Amino acid sequence: GENVEQHPSTLSVQEGDSAVIKCTYSDSASNYFPWYKQELGKRPQLIIDIRSNVGEKKDQRIAVTLNKTAKHFSLHITETQPEDSAVYFCAALKGGYSTLTFGKGTMLLVSP
Amino acid sequence: GAVVSQHPSRVICKSGTSVKIECRSLDFQATTMFWYRQFPKQSLMLMATSNEGSKATYEQGVEKDKFLINHASLTLSTLTVTSAHPEDSSFYICSAQKESGGNNQPQHFGDGTRLSIL
């Protein structure tokens, strides 16, 4: 089955800095990679996703890159703000109604 | 939009009680819904995949007789934790995927149910 590794487990940055979270996956058949943000005690919210036919996608301060050859994808947050503080999960999916495999999460703390 | 409603949000009950959690897709049809369990400071662990009109598919190590899943319609799946014990205390979250030809649609999560068994 699929295995998703996520690093780092915790990340502390100063407001305004950039934050990068990296994930690797094991199944080369995986072709959909969403990122979720989860605040304490709340639901995971989809913040950005990328499909395997593109290498990069950007939405305002958030971008995701995908390297299919190396089987890794990364989340980039620029100009971080305190409200970006949360746990971020990457995930991989093989397609159709296959199940998502989640990384273990990264706790991002943005200090004012 | 893609709104998923989950109820109840919080349950506190005595050991031995059975607890039912509902997951509804409010503005879309979901052939497939998923049930996750999340322990504090940990990732989401898939428990089972719920398919409308058929039996759920359980992940390895998840007792199907303990966690009963019913997906009676395209907008409703229920998870019943039978004879719950303190070790079943956790955060249970459902998600639903839009019915759209199965072409990598994102999963949308409910608000979760915090279950505490005394």
Image (cartoon, coloured by chain):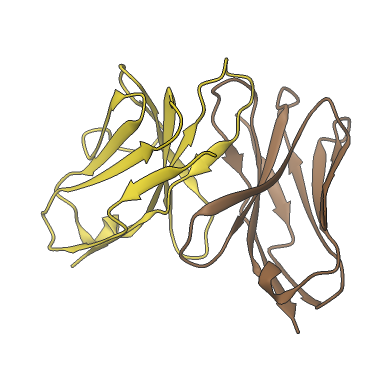
Chain colours: A brown, B yellow
Q: Going by the image, does A35 lie left or right of B42?
A: right
- Residue B19's place in the image compared with A17, above or below, is above
Q: Residue furthest bottom?
A: A112
- Residue A44's place in the image compared with B26, above or below, is below
What residue do we see at 70% from left, 31% from top?
A32
Whole-percent x, y for residue B55 in the image: 30, 20
Whole-percent x, y for residue B6 in the image: 35, 48
Whole-percent x, y for residue B89 in the image: 29, 60
Q: Going by the image, does B97 lie left or right of B68?
A: right
What residue do we see at 87% from left, 72% from top?
A17
Residue A95 placement: quadrant: top right
**On the rendered image, what quadrant is the C terminus of chain A found in?**
bottom right
What residue do we see at 67% from left, 72% from top?
A83
Q: Going by the image, does A25 lie left or right of A1?
A: right
What residue do we see at 54% from left, 37% from top?
B107
**On the rendered image, what quadrant is the N terminus of chain A found in?**
top right
Total tally of numbered discs in the picture: 0
Residue B76 placement: quadrant: top left
- Residue B83's place in the image compared with A30, above or below, is below
